[in-house]
Image (cartoon, grey):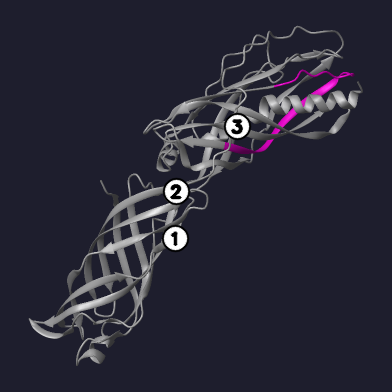
Amino acid sequence: MSSKSRALRKGAAIGASAGVVVGLAGALGAGTASAAPASPARPMLAGTHTFNYTCTYPLIGKRPLKVAIDTNIPEKLGVSQNTGKIQVSWTATLGDDTTSGLNAVDGASIEGSAEAKAQVVGPGYPNGVNVSTKNALQPTPIPSSGSFQIKGYGEAPGISFDSAGQVTAKLGDMNLNVLLKKKDGTPGALGTFKAPCTMDAGQDATVASGQVVDGDQTLPTPVTPPSYFPYTGAPVSPGQLSYAFNLKGSSFIKSPNGTMPLDGSIGVKVDGATGAITGDLTLKKATGKMNILGFLPVDATVDFAQVGQTVGTYANGEIKTTSTMYIKLPVMSLMGIPLGGGDQCQSSKPSAIDMFSTPGQFFDPKKGGPYKASNYVISDIVNCGPLNGILSIFTAGSGNTIDANLTPSA
């Protein structure tokens, strides 16, 4: 066998044994990693090495990670000496933020595989060779809160070099293939999904380095691979997530300078593949005070009548929706004297109300949170009686807002 072909085998093996392991841990999130038990012989890179990645999950967005790995690659290898099967193990601790994100999409356990990239520089390949490898992670339950640990394992065929020299392997980015399962053991709504992971800048990506020297060297004794290796799970298609919330808050109507209490509910379906939201928003009739001409206190009953469904997205841990609604004004009175209203009194056009969770903060559907509209428009009102024209001047316009909170319904 030529030195070039053996060098290629060297690159593939190092990538399989190191890069993939980190890739899987990256899929799982952040936390302080702990090393797996040391192998019988010292690895090429002395001690356990920790890497930082950022992985992007569907719906819940980016999560950081820290993971430490160990390999049985010897510190020194003789010229033409075969390493024997290369084995890698890792143990990572996933932080509470990752746990919350996985729970939010009905994850009760996690399993899967990964494809990782590495570049190996060695005799015959001064510019390096890129390799892509695979690994498996131990199926692991996800707690309801707090951090948790997960282990992984990988291996690659033995390798050898025909000449002496320095060998260095550096990790790159990776892609994860992960399946979350629900509490009953069935696949979750995300199905088998890919999560790209990028290595954080400013760190040494070296996972193994050592020397090929004259004379055979002492090699570690192989260990028995765990039962979960290799990963054999079949791909699962995504489904739908279901969430139901109670809504409470208020809407400020700018033109008449009035605030209306809001009380209602919303139930949504979320596409596990795209994060697309569809659902129904129901708001109860509400009565509040408005001020016409700045000093006339008008009691008004407002009814929000939805047109079609609420639509939107759940992406990067944030929700954004649009609800299209007619604004109805069945009752308007001044000190008990009717000014207008009726069953047909409403805005001439429906209002498109864009609502959103707090930007930059993770919205956990299992806990709820703020849900707001920064500006929506009420068109001219019609069919409100003899004073319709005057009343419309003091009700129509932009700058209307909603400040509400969503809580999961029982």
Figure check: 84 above or below 69: above
In x, y percent, where is residue 306? 32, 69
Residue that carries the numbered disc 2 in the rendered image: 240
Figure check: 309 above or below 339: above
Q: Quadrant of residue 36?
A: top right
Per the image, label 3 sits on a secondary structure element best described as strand
Front residue of this view, candidates 148 and 154: 154
At horizontal 66% and vertical 35% (from top left) the residue drawn is 115
At horizontal 80% and vertical 30% (from top left) the residue drawn is 121
Task: Classify mark 1: residues with Cα within 10 Å, few (<14), some (14-19) or many (20+).
Answer: many
Amino acid carrying mark 3 in the image: Ser
Residue that carries the numbered disc 3 in the rendered image: 113
Numbered tag placed on residue 223 in the rendering = none
Task: Classify mark 2: residues with Cα within 10 Å, few (<14), some (14-19) or many (20+).
Answer: many
> Which residue ends up furthest to the left in the rendered image?
336
Q: Give the mark toward the camera: 3 or 2.
A: 2
Task: Mark 3 or mark 2: name the one nearer the start of the chain.
Answer: 3
Per the image, label 1 sits on a secondary structure element best described as strand
Per the image, label 2 sits on a secondary structure element best described as strand
In x, y percent, where is residue 136? 60, 27
At horizontal 36% and vertical 33% (from top left) the residue drawn is 144
Amino acid carrying mark 1 in the image: Gly
Figure check: 359 above or below 97: below
Q: How many marks?
A: 3
Amino acid carrying mark 2 in the image: Gln
Measured in 3D between alpha carbons, the distance from the residue under mark 3 to the one under mark 2, in whole angstroms, is: 23 Å
At horizontal 81% and vertical 34% (from top left) the residue drawn is 128
Q: Is 253 left, or right, of 7 in this rendering?
A: left
